[in-house]
Image (tube, rainbow, N blue to C red):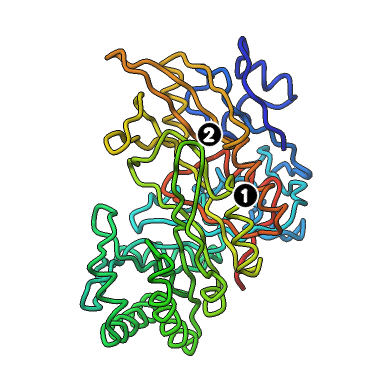
């Protein structure tokens, strides 16, 4: 795998010819929507399969997998376009393997129950766990959710992906309800009721475990959170279920300085099966126009590794871009989220040139809108993903979390699947 940065004068055909691959393959691999509108500075992932096979009459995916001593799941990972097809055809090329010798990755992906079926099927071969956002807790220990999650759980089972019930105190619009949090943390009876409600849902819907999303945890309240987690773990472990955490490390931004709250993560890791460190990004954010993350905050990574065993660490991998109007005004300004395709469409419309910042591992461009307002867009591209994974690898961290998988980020999955082996839970 290599990453190419589009230069002035490049066309999709000239790039494909340069690398000796077909234009169609380059477009499909990278999920390119507008191949004739490449943006100077955008990335393209060039893949170099280790072994390929040309389909013959009578071939099936299962038969090809058996012939080459690989799994059908590996074939679907290497050829994601096959996930939503009923047939394979004589003459087409199937990628059997890549030289993905950089080690293993445990991949957890957040999803809502209403994820598009085609995107879900394309993503599942590359996941270890799916974390399903469906249930919110109340101050009385009840859980509010729907039965939409049943389909995504059953589909994941076919692909060997474990499903975790995500339990949050989010409101319907994504805000934390602190009254609910305080009610649960301070009342033993409410905790007991909540735990039994969680256990009933796990059994009824065939979840593999629970993921407790903790927000606004600090030195003053961490013991309350730990007591609650310990009680949940003791009860659910007895029943054979996983108990994971998602912890927001509370990154704070002061100019170019990024700080975080030093929590005793060691105690939390002892009573749980793993911790995902992730900052939730919603449709808009109010922080300054920076793209620093957990991965680029070395002091935070150093602290996490000193507290938590490596096999229990999962680090959130940012995938969204954000568009800020300038100048940024603290307390007033916000930025709107964009996926990778939307970023490229906007850059093309504005005739922008994409640049890359090595410190934050982020791509960016500036533009002026129709109201003559200056904007800056920061986002993650193939370089960001590749560099982030290699930083985690240098720490010995093999677990990542994707927020979220509702959109199929082709370049991200290419970078992952051409270099790493995905851990599956037996």
- Measuring 51% from the left and 74% from the top, which residue is drawn there? 268
Residue on which disc 1 sits: 298
In this rendering, the label closer to the viewer, 1 or 2: 1
- Measuring 27% from the left and 55% from the top, which residue is drawn there? 175
Q: Which mark is residue 31?
A: 2
The quadrant where residue 273 appears: bottom right
Q: Which mark is residue 375?
A: none
Marks 1 and 2, how far apart in space? Answer: 32 Å
- Counting from the top left corner in percent of width and height, residue 60 is at 64, 54
Task: State if disc 2 and disc 1 touch (CB < 8 Å).
Answer: no
- Measuring 35% from the left and 41% from the top, which residue is drawn there? 285
Horizontal side of residue 255 vs 43, given as left or right: left
Tell which of 229 and 260 is nearer to you: 260
Against 143, residue 316 (above or below) is above
Tell which of 250 and 321 is nearer to you: 250
Horizontal side of residue 368 vs 363, given as left or right: left
């Amino acid at each position: 795998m290599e990453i190419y940065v589009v230069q002035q004068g490049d066309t999709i055909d000239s790039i494909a010819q340069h690398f000796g691959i077909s234009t169609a393959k380059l477009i499909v691999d990278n999920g390119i929507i507008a191949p004739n509108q490449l943006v100077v500075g955008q990335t393209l992932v060039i893949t170099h399969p280790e072994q390929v096979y040309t389909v013959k009459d009578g071939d099936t995916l299962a038969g090809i997998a058996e012939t080459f001593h690989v799994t059908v799941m590996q074939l679907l990972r290497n050829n994601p376009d096959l996930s939503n097809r009923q047939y394979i055809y004589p003459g087409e090329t199937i990628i059997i393997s890549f030289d993905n010798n950089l080690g293993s990755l445990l991949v957890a992906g957040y999803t809502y129950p209403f994820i598009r079926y085609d995107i879900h099927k394309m993503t599942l071969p590359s996941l270890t766990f799916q974390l399903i956002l469906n249930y919110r807790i109340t101050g009385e220990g009840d859980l509010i959710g729907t039965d939409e999650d049943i389909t995504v759980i059953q589909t994941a089972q076919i692909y060997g992906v474990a499903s975790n019930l995500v339990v949050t105190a989010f409101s319907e619009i994504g805000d934390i309800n602190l009254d609910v949090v305080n009610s649960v943390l301070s009342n033993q009876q409410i905790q007991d009721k909540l735990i039994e409600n969680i256990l009933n849902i796990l059994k009824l819907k065939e979840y593999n475990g629970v993921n407790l999303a903790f927000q606004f945890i600090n030195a003053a309240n961490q013991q309350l959170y730990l007591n609650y987690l310990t009680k949940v773990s003791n009860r659910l472990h007895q029943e054979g279920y996983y108990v994971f955490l998602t912890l927001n490390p509370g990154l704070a931004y002061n100019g170019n300085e990024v700080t975080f709250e030093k929590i005793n993560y060691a105690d939390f890791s002892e009573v749980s099966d793993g911790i995902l460190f992730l900052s939730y990004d919603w449709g808009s954010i109010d922080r300054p126009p920076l793209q620093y993350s957990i991965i680029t905050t070395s002091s935070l990574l150093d602290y996490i590794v000193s507290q938590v065993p490596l096999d229990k660490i999962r680090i959130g991998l940012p995938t969204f871009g954000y568009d800020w109007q300038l100048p940024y005004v603290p307390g007033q300004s916000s930025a709107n989220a964009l996926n990778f395709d939307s970023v490229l469409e906007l850059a093309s419309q504005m005739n922008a040139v994409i640049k890359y910042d090595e410190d934050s591992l982020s791509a960016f461009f500036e533009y002026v809108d129709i109201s003559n307002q200056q904007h800056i867009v920061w986002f993650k591209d193939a370089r960001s993903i590749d560099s982030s994974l290699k930083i985690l690898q240098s720490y010995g961290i093999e677990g990542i979390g994707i927020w979220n998988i509702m959109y199929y980020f082709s370049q991200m999955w290419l970078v992952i699947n051409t270099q790493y082996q995905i851990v599956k839970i037996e």
